[in-house]
Structure formats: structure tokens, C-alpha cells
Image: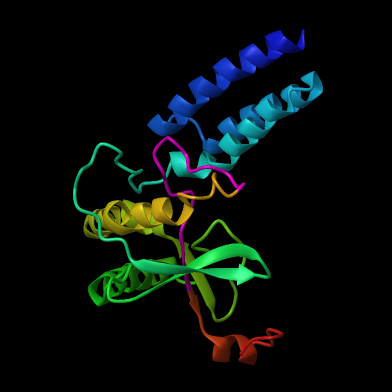
Amino acid sequence: DLSEVADALQRSSQLETVAVKLGIHDINDLAICLNGLATNFCKMGEFDSAVDVISSWGECGSIRSSLEPEDLASHEPKSIPKFEWIKAGERDVAITTYGDTAVFDEDDIALIRAAADKRFAQANGAQTSRYTMQYEGNREVHLDGLCKNDPALKERMDNILQEKIYPLVREAFKDQGDNGGHPPPLGALSVYDSIFVRYNGDVARKAGRIGAS
């Protein structure tokens, strides 16, 4: 009975979510469970439920992030940077900020760079990201990974998320539901991933990387 399988997988995914948050199980276990649940819903013809599960699957990364999710109960003043949409034809694809309120000030940038420099030096050429776009002249590291080992950086990044980034996302997408898009989530926002990339075109070009500049 597919409905019984779906019930079992839903209970399993709830348990796996708790286990991942506690660090008992790897996040891949939860992804496998959600994949099975989405497949089962498709077999049952419950495609909306399958899409909801796929969305949860896509958000798996944020469960183990060391960065704090949005605090919906906070009434602290927000400092939302001015922004405008970047378009591809008639479609909004990204936003760019401008004006006097920067997302990161110079001290924030210096803090991130120092943490990344330390991580790259400790790695001594080893891969520092779970992604594979790392080669001569190109280094990358996940921000939540830097924050796990740097309390001062984590505190500052969490403050920026609460004071600027989460409010900016809310402001940017507040009208999406009215305009035929997806309405903003009712629950707390969280960081799925954030990557620090250092690129040296001269080194990449000398190494024969096509298109490097």
C-alpha cells in the first residue's frame, strides 16, 4: 500500500531531521529518505506533495548550517540596504544593492578574508569545499565552515543576517505572491549555502585554464 509506505517515510524523515540536527546522522541519510518519499508521492499521483518534499530536500543543507536562521520573534531595528532587480528580458533574476547601507562594511570583509586566508593556509592545497570548481588560481570555502571555527566571525555574520540580509530578502520578495510568483515563506528564513571564492586569473591562465582572464 503506497499510502502506508508514504506514512512510514514521513515518520522516518522527521526522525532523520532530528538526528541530523543533533549531528547523529549524516545529512545524506535524510536526503535519501526524502528522495524516496517524493518518488512514492509521484507514484500515488500526489504531485503537489512530491513538490513540497523536493523543496524540503533542497533545503537539507541549511539544517546543518552553523549560521542562525531568521529570528521571527525579534523586534530589533532593521537596516535594509536599498536594492534593485537585475533582469533577463522581463524576468527578475537577482538583486543588486546600492546606497549608503552596505551589506558588509570594510571590517566585515576583512574578517571574512582573514578567516579564509587561515583556512586556505591550513589546507595546504587540499580541497576546502565540497564543490569541485577548485583549481590553479581558484579557491573556495563555505562560510558556515569558517564560522564553525571562528566565534567572532559567526557572531558578526549572524548579526548581519538578522539585521540586513533576512530583512532584505523579505522586502525583495514581499510582492511575489501578488504578482503570480511564489509567496514569501511563513516560516523562518535560513542559509542553504554561502561560498567565499578567491580567483586569480593570472595564475589560472598560466596553468592553461581556457577562458581565464
- Give 47 or 191, whichever is nearer the viewer: 47
Was residue 181 drawn as part of the magenta stretch in this picture? Answer: yes
Query: Quick one: 85 or 10, which is closer to the camera?
Result: 85
Q: Is residue 100 left or right of residue 126?
A: left
> Residue at image x 23%, y 41%?
74
The verdict on residue 116 being magenta is: no
**Residue 71 placement (x, y as % from top left):** 29, 41
Q: Which residues are magenta?
A: 180-197
**Residue shown at the point (53%, 39%) measured from the top left:** 60
Q: Position of residue 194 (x, y in %)?
A: 46, 58
In which quadrant of the rendered image does the C terminus lie? bottom right
In the rendered image, the vertical position of residue 135 relative to residue 54, given as above or below: below
Q: State which quadrant residue 104 falls in.
A: bottom left
Give the dominant element type of the magenta stretch: helix, strand or loop.
loop
Numbered circles on residues, count:
0
Percent x, y of residue 21: 41, 32
Point 56% across, 35% down: residue? 56
Look at the image and tell me whether residue 181 can be seen: yes
For residue 207, what is the image quadrant?
bottom right
Pick whichever, 164 or 41, lies toward us.
Answer: 164
Query: Which residue is farthest left?
Result: 76
Q: Tell me: residue 195, above or below residue 45.
A: below
Q: Position of residue 103 (x, y in %)?
A: 33, 67
Viewer can see residue 23: no
Render colour scheme:
rainbow
Task: Decide if residue 36 is on the left or right side of residue 28.
Answer: right
Residue drawn at 49 percent across, 50 percent down: 175
Residue 164 is drawn in which quadrant?
A: bottom left
